[in-house]
Amino acid sequence: MKNPETSIFAALLFLSVYASAQKFEKLYQYVNPLIGTEKMGHTYPGATVPFGAIQLSPETDTISYELNGKYNGEVYKYCAGYRYEDKTITGFSSTHFSGTGHSDLGDFLIMPTVGTLQLNPGTASNPENGYRSRFSHQNEKAEAGYYRVKLDDHNILAELTATPRVGVHRYTFPKSDQSHIILDLMAGIYNYDGKNVWTYARVENNNTITGYRQTNGWARTRTVYFAMTFSKPFKSYGQKSYDEKQVYKGFWRKFDQTKNSPEIAGKNLKMYFDFDTNENEAIEIKFAISPVSQTNALENLEQETGRLSFDQIKAKAQENWNKELNKIIIKGSDTQKTNFYTAMYHTFINPTIYMDVNGEYKGLDQNTHKAENFTNYTTFSLWDTYRALHPFFNIIQPKRNNDMVRSMMAHYNQFSMKMLPIWSHYANDNWCMSGYHSVSVVADAIIKGNYDGDPKEALRACVETANKRDYEGIGQYIDSGYIPAEKNGTSVSNTLEYAYDDWAIAQLAKHLGETEIYNQFIKRSTNWKNNFDKTIGFMRPRLADGSFKKDFDVLSTHGQGFIEGNSWNYSFFVPQSPNELITMMGGKKKFASKLDELFTMHLPDEFFADTEDITREGIIGGYVHGNEPAHHVAYLYNWADQPWKAQSQIRHILEMQYKATPDGLGGNDDTGQMSAWYILSSLGFYPVAPGSEDYSIGSPAIENAVLHLENGKIFEIEAINQSPQNVYVQKVLLNGKEIKNFTLKHSEIVNGGKLTFYMGNKAKK
Amino acid sequence: MKNPETSIFAALLFLSVYASAQKFEKLYQYVNPLIGTEKMGHTYPGATVPFGAIQLSPETDTISYELNGKYNGEVYKYCAGYRYEDKTITGFSSTHFSGTGHSDLGDFLIMPTVGTLQLNPGTASNPENGYRSRFSHQNEKAEAGYYRVKLDDHNILAELTATPRVGVHRYTFPKSDQSHIILDLMAGIYNYDGKNVWTYARVENNNTITGYRQTNGWARTRTVYFAMTFSKPFKSYGQKSYDEKQVYKGFWRKFDQTKNSPEIAGKNLKMYFDFDTNENEAIEIKFAISPVSQTNALENLEQETGRLSFDQIKAKAQENWNKELNKIIIKGSDTQKTNFYTAMYHTFINPTIYMDVNGEYKGLDQNTHKAENFTNYTTFSLWDTYRALHPFFNIIQPKRNNDMVRSMMAHYNQFSMKMLPIWSHYANDNWCMSGYHSVSVVADAIIKGNYDGDPKEALRACVETANKRDYEGIGQYIDSGYIPAEKNGTSVSNTLEYAYDDWAIAQLAKHLGETEIYNQFIKRSTNWKNNFDKTIGFMRPRLADGSFKKDFDVLSTHGQGFIEGNSWNYSFFVPQSPNELITMMGGKKKFASKLDELFTMHLPDEFFADTEDITREGIIGGYVHGNEPAHHVAYLYNWADQPWKAQSQIRHILEMQYKATPDGLGGNDDTGQMSAWYILSSLGFYPVAPGSEDYSIGSPAIENAVLHLENGKIFEIEAINQSPQNVYVQKVLLNGKEIKNFTLKHSEIVNGGKLTFYMGNKAKK
């Protein structure tokens, strides 16, 4: 029976939240999208809205994935298309990953120019030989939902903003009868000769173009459709094909194909549009994308932007960001706010919407599907994001996280292999990294009450995924309890991660009363023990005959059975059973000492060189925060009864690894995982083992934080006596009642309430 | 007011027609699809249903469009995939053109084999080195809707039948534990390296595969989707990629991709499926295609074949053919019947349905459209078919011809260039040949009352098409009244054909009361005069300065301003104004003598060598029946008051150019145009100028023909005293009333009635 008083209270609370929502703080002013654009952050500075399908951002060079037919290491720097240290911009494209360590996308590069038409991008050293332009950071401004830069060589001001599915460009030209806008269908990130499978463009009328780009890259079979409109009709247009071979090039020979020919198709094409412009005349482009069709792209364009101007769209984009950022109101220094809200911004970029306004999207079966009562998402970098990003969403974006799980289930159902995603990428799986961590995201969401689909069907999908014997050693893992090192280059990572994932499945099974599945997977979750070499106290590759690999180096990340980490880091990867790991490692004291050693050891440069995706500063001792396997490690001190060491290390990491500068991120942001770690740890707790309701308490970095939850509840965190020196928690109270075990439950957050930390500069032992 | 008696009469007539429809003659037994498969006919022998989207037929070799990077003349012979003189079969593919002189298609080659798996086709001289097999015509049977052949090397009986969108294969195997069915996604007609833009296949379950083939060939941007089912689950399957470059080939490295990997994608792929078979075990394949999606292909498969067996589908296909063939019941010799019904069969193959069972099809804008209340067609070879095929449809397939005009209008509306089709080919225009003859088809259908769309919109489309100044000299044609020879290699053909087309537009405008348009286009229709050189009495290229081309040869087809014809043939191409042409040529007597000369002259071999698409036998004197520009020429004797010469020539052509043998066709059947000429001329009349209601009367070859019209009316043709010698018409009566002017009106046919010829062996002068 419903308590009428409670209902009235809830209604009042809702009204008060709603009222406060009407006067959001202008938190988007603290977002600096340039953070992470230098060194290893791999973020992009351009315009996007929360979880937007469009990521409209500048490219600063055209580095090919290949050099002389081989992988070109230089391309790695350009994962997000933009490098802060570069001096020229080649144009503005519609799609980008945020913080990845491999890449793709960069579709539909657009560049405005003035003067003689040049269709090649030119080089950084000689920008005048192409369409690219010099720029300077003085004339550049990046905000949440807005980006601006002066293109010095063309004397054009370029501005970008976006809706979820439409990128909006505004180019303010000088007076010229030779103003051009180039649409380079050949350009792209991680491009190589042959990556464009097919492109097509069609001039619908004197200001509308539609078409598509089909690529074979990190996503094997991928097509993005587009529709673009110019605010001003072009006076003429043209095309150029760079296809070396066109058997039927005489095909359309009955027309002049260079000027004003309304349709092009091929693999290597560029188009241009000519305008007469007056001094300071602005031309706006609305550029919509769709995973399904040009028709849908046009509908996206119409529905999302209609007759809205650039300024109106920009205002909506920033209002949109503000609404999301206002879900957490913190007190702290301006630098802290910049770090915090930029981190929030980075967590709310990925996964990305992969669905048209009419609900249609392309499935992994290459068919068009309609999302029924959910928003379909892609860009799931799950090896990274199961750890903290999705758990963070379970607190602050539960509806979206529900839809992300629905999206994973759609992926599973549509995919020929019938597996949940490993790395979902535009109706493909790119199979990046180890584990089958979507099961963790699924289990965590269901256990935390954030899934409106059929939970038993979801469990079946998890079980089926975990039983794909042909997939990366799973068969051997099931048969032997570990993956023989001869069979798999990352045998230890895989075994450890499978074991954790199996534990998550077991938790879900328990939650759903599926005892048999629970028993099976809880047993599998102990498989980490099979790679633990007690004689050395480290995880170690094991051969088919049961013996451990000889010539083993606990510091190296190269050829030792691990991925993005060495044995030192991975040996702590038993998030599901820290207590058992502690026992295996000789008890709490020895375990704590080992953690001490990790954080203080000297990692020789030769081993750093092997470590991917991070800067030298991304390492503390031998602890590699720039890569994910160690993200829970500092919190393990809590299990060793030395929580004060967790507290100081966490505060140290927060300070050292996240700086409010372009080069401020210690490693790839990894579609928001690094930023989610920052936010949760700043708030004072972290999900060591998603799939459990428990958060492990660390040391909050903010003075105060108010979380406005979607259920209308408020959860407040206060840190009394907070200061950079007062990193030690003296006492922590939940709704006035002391927490003794350094554990906070998810339900305690979502029920609303207050977490009060008393901070001090001395460890409370 | 309605006359009740007439109504009752109509009802009775309807009942009688309906009753007779229940006991159709087995006319499909007279169809021999092997006719035209040798020499120049370019027909295919496989299984299709009337206007079916599927043309399931054997391929006898794998000739590439290119040889050492250049056009390979040998490929021309393989336009239809099958050559009667070949000794081996490489497999059975789903799509073929019938009778064309350029080609494409051959999608989804399937080949059953026994023994060690071989994925390459092998060569004709060493078939055992590949999957192909020897065969002999003794073990081959081709019928309307059914094809059978024994594959000697594999001891497999292959049988084919079809529904409109589903090809059905039945392979009867010997006992073997090494039986295979190969799906070669690389194979195709007029293939070349790079023609496959992308292919994709997905194993849905143990007997269902879906996927698509995307090509860049004669159709620039073309994708065909498929869904196939096996009647028996395969025991295993595999794939092989022949892609030289696959940057992300390690992409799916986490799986074994050679065996039982359920998804493939790339440019050069083959799949195979393994079976254990017992002696004489038949495996059936249902193979559906769709222009839109795999989902639609599956729906086509389900809707059209459901649980029907091969034999049931074959029976339906043949019943379907029988129903269509019974629209004309002739009396004549068995050879005549074979020629006549095979010709009817060939006229009812193209255009082909381009639409799924749910009404969806891909438009020229690359979007998916839904056909509202019509069936969408493609494969319009209009330079050929406007002459007699579409006029024949206006008599015997008016509903389908209406839908074909609707399809042309959809093409016009969806195409970026806003033109009616020149050669409509799977959501592309391949621009083959001269003129804009769809206007003739549109005008003819509307004038004859066979169009349920908006006729004024159709007229606008005709006018817009005829005013595309950038298209093949139209601008110069409009400005100067002819196309200067310097500007265009086929300037005279174009001018003559545009002039006829303009006349057709004028007729439509007149029909619709659009006087201004009529005046404009009737004036343009006289432009043929600008290429007529009175001094020599021939059509002749003219230069920009108004002078005629020097060094001109009336016999040559090479570089003289004509296409598929020389000046001798094209000089008679004024179907819209024979009387004016006669005047220009010096009067009736001189004109008739000139026709005599055409039919009796000796054309030196050097000029034959220049003439495309025909056999030596395809020429009578200098008259080239194997190419279309002369198809109306024999009938022109009627205008010269020497109808008996028309009569004898027509009977001569019918006898010489159409033989009931594989090598029996004197030229490319051209998607049914040659066959339509045969049928109409055999019936005794021909549409010299489509766009007019008039048919010119020739000499019937049959004894009797009864046309069962769609409106329920019956039109009977009787030739009294018919014999091979009695080619001369002594008298012709319509419903008992003598026709004096050798003209029959369309309305006189469709109102029902009887045309009686009295034949004799002497010309009636």
Image (cartoon, coloured by chain):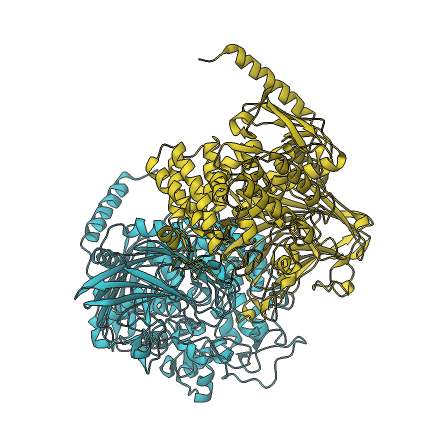
Chain colours: A cyan, B yellow
B505 or A12, which lies in front? B505
Residue located farthest toward the left when viewing the structure as drawn: A279
At 63% across and 30% down in the image, what residue appears?
B327
Q: Position of residue A154 (x, y in %)?
A: 24, 73
Q: Based on the displayed image, in which of its 4 quarters is residue A339 positioned? A: bottom left
A321 or B117, which lies in front? B117
Q: Is residue B155 above or below residue A77?
A: above
Lateral position of residue B292 relative to residue B61, left or right:
left
Lateral position of residue B162 relative to residue B551, left or right:
right
Quadrant in the picture for the C terminus of chain B: top right
Q: Based on the displayed image, in which of its 4 quarters is residue A283 positioned? A: bottom left
Q: Is residue A311 visible?
A: yes
Q: Is residue B411 visible?
A: no
Q: Position of residue A733 (x, y in %)?
A: 29, 63
Quadrant in the picture for the N terminus of chain B: top left
Count of numbered circles in the view: 0
Q: Position of residue B99 (x, y in %)?
A: 62, 49
A668 or B60, which lies in front? B60
Lateral position of residue B151 relative to residue A572, left or right:
right
At 65% across and 31% down in the image, what residue appears?
B323
A195 or A443, which lies in front? A195
Q: Position of residue B65 (x, y in %)?
A: 60, 63
Q: Is residue A547 above or below residue B132?
A: below
